[in-house]
Image (cartoon, rainbow, N blue to C red):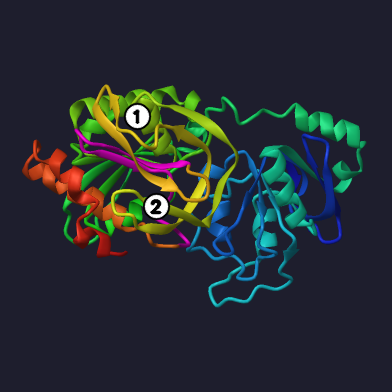
Amino acid sequence: MTSTARTATGTSAVLVLEDGRSFRGRAYGAVGETFGEAVFNTGMTGYQETLTDPSYHRQIVVMTAPHIGNTGVNDEDPESARIWVSGYVVRDPARKPSNWRSVRTLDEELTAQGVVGISGVDTRALTRHLRERGAMRAGIFSGEAASADGTALLERVRSAPSMHGADLCGEVAAREPYVVPAQGEKRFTVAAVDLGIKGMTPHRMAERGIEVHVLPADASAEDVYAVRPDGVFFSNGPGDPAAAGHPVALMQAVLERGTPLFGICFGNQILGRALGFGTFKLKYGHRGVNQPVQDRSTGKVEVTAHNHGFAVDAPLSTVSETPYGRAEVSHVCLNDDVVEGLRLLDRPAFSVQYHPEAAAGPHDAAYLFDRFTALMDEHRRNPAGAREQHQHSSTNPHLEDRRA
């Protein structure tokens, strides 16, 4: 991505897709050019959390909500220290934000961080195109770059790297370990493997008395067990899970030792691979805060937050035999039957494909952090009995009723 941090008002811009379709508009944020995979997000709120989610690394995000920037930008809601999206596409940007926490406009924030965007685009038409043709490589060009020959711009888009085979978690993860202390009395210690972790995730665990040791993506099993964890967590993150060999090997080492394990999003895909399942790229993925998922053990339907373009290829109707015992699909998306969760029946390990930390919401799935603490508590008191506890934890009404 190249950009110049100057005012974009009135500057022409063009979005070019790799299949040759283009959309003209006005520059939004920094002026220049950028490349990435074009995807759409259906959330009507939480644009700061979207922009700063490391899972969006190397993606150009199209917002389906027509008005973006209404509440400006504050310093409390970001999920990481920077914006990770490669580019940003909106229809009608707010001319003036209105919120008591706002300290600057979204346009100013995008410009300051060098994020090239485009506004004035028919995002309904663009979203329908991506639903029909699938997520694809794209480029945003503004200012002088937008006046270049269309054929030349298309060739540059097509020469950009694909998301297939992209190993990206090491590019977004923390370089050094850090600790998020427990709030109140410390109950447990968790080693969290950072594959692109969002800031709210260790915060949700800290709220439950967990001291979280966040470790880089290249952490070894020795690094994980050096913190004497009661449980191990694998975070969300960007890229193709088929290319993430190290996290898979690390998770297998954790499974061998039988330590309580919880994974979300990319962590769910890593668990799938660790168990021997394949993964595949979805046509256009799930991205937004309004995705219906059913917990198959209770029949309960949750409205959940998603951000994933890959999924686990596991059988929905049968229990599978794996090197670590029996496994089953625990959650499924009601829109398309995509696997949204896995659970081992003979070891204390489970995962979900969505985001239970859910900033900016919804909070239907917050109980999953309680399920993780219950698993660690049972394993501490009775390591052998933790397996039976895990088999029945999803039907425990005390866990289902608790919300963050």
Disc 2: which residue = 294
Image quarter (top left, top right, bottom left or bottom right) of the N terminus: top right
Query: Which amino acid, by three-letter code, is at mark 1?
Result: Ala
Please state the extent of the stretch shown in magenta in the rendering. Answer: 338-361
Residue 350 colored magenta?
yes
Look at the image and tell me whether residue 101 can be seen: yes
| Residue 223 location (% of width, % of height) | 27, 30
**Which is more toward the observer, 297 or 141?**
297
Question: Mark 2 or mark 1, which is nearer the start of the sequence?
Answer: 1
Q: Residues within 10 Å of mark 1 (few under 14, many from 20)?
A: some
Mark 1 vs mark 2, CA separation in Å: 33 Å
The number of discs equals 2
Residue 156 colored magenta?
no
**In the picture provided, is 194 more to the left or to the right than 145?**
left
| Residue 268 location (% of width, % of height) | 39, 38
Rendering quarter of residue 208: bottom left
Rendering quarter of residue 33: top right
Q: Is mark 2 on a helix, strand or loop?
A: strand
- Give me the disc on residue 219: 1
Look at the image and tell me whether residue 1 can be seen: no
**Which is more toward the observer, 201 or 222?**
201
